[in-house]
Structure formats: structure tokens, C-alpha cells
Image (tube, rainbow, N blue to C red):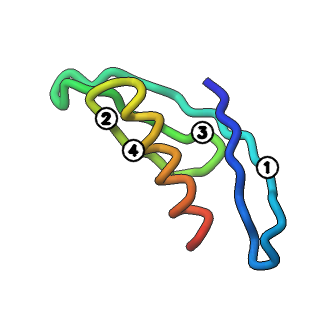
Amino acid sequence: MGREFLWYDEAMKVRKFDYLISLTWDKSYKGYVADVVNLYGCMSQGKTKKEAILNAEKAIKAFIEV
């Protein structure tokens, strides 16, 4: 699933990035693991697909800020 992500730099210029998010069902967690394929080690999880994707978007933002 590809997601578009908008990022504002210090000059408030908008930059657009596309990321591939892979969702996998985790039986022990009873929810979805969202792996951002383009960003090594960037992942999140959620009880629903929507929650996992929203959490992955937060993870992307945190990953980029570091």
C-alpha cells in the first residue's frame, strides 16, 4: 500500500514523499504490524489496518525528524 506523505522544511516549503507500507497480521498481538519498506527499521502497529497506517505515518515523521 503506497502512502503520500507531506513534509514541511524549515522554510515551510512542502516536500512530498511516497512510502510503501506493508501490513502483516500478528497473531500474538492480535493486530497489524506496519513496516515502512522504504525506511529501514521504521515500523509501527495497530489493532486495525487504519490504526496501523496512522501510527506508521507518525513513525515516518519521527524517523525523518531524527
Residue labelled with disc 2: 46
- 60 to the left or right of 18: left
**55 lies left or right of 62:** left
Labels 4, 1: front one: 1
Amino acid type of the residue that numbered disc 4 sits on in the rendered structure: Ser
Compute the Cα span from label 2 to label 3: 17 Å
3D distance between C-alphas at marks 4 and 1: 21 Å
**Label 4: how many Cα within 10 Å (few below 14, some 14–19, many 20+):** many
Q: Residue at x 45, y 26 (%)?
A: 23
Mark 4 or 1 closer to N-term? 1
Which residue lies at the image location 45% right of the left edge and 46% below the top edge?
43
Q: CA distance from mark 4 to mark 3?
A: 12 Å
Disc 4 on helix, strand or loop? Answer: strand
Amino acid found under the numbered disc labelled 2: Gly
Residue 1 percent coordinates (x, y): 61, 24
Mark 3 packing: few (<14 Cα in 10 Å), some, or many (20+)?
Answer: some
Q: Are marks 2 and 4 in contact (CB under 8 Å)?
A: yes
Distance from label 2 to label 1 (Cα)? Answer: 25 Å
- The answer for how far apart the CA atoms under marks 1 and 3 are is 17 Å
- Residue lying at the far front of the rendered structure: 12
| Residue at which label 3 appears | 37
What whole-number distance in Å separates the C-alpha atoms at marks 2 and 4?
Answer: 7 Å
Tag in front: 2 or 3 = 2
The residue type indicated by label 3 comes to Val
Question: Would you name the residue on which mark 4 appears?
Answer: 44
| Marks 4, 3: nearer the viewer | 4
Identify the residue at the far bottom of this view.
Answer: 10
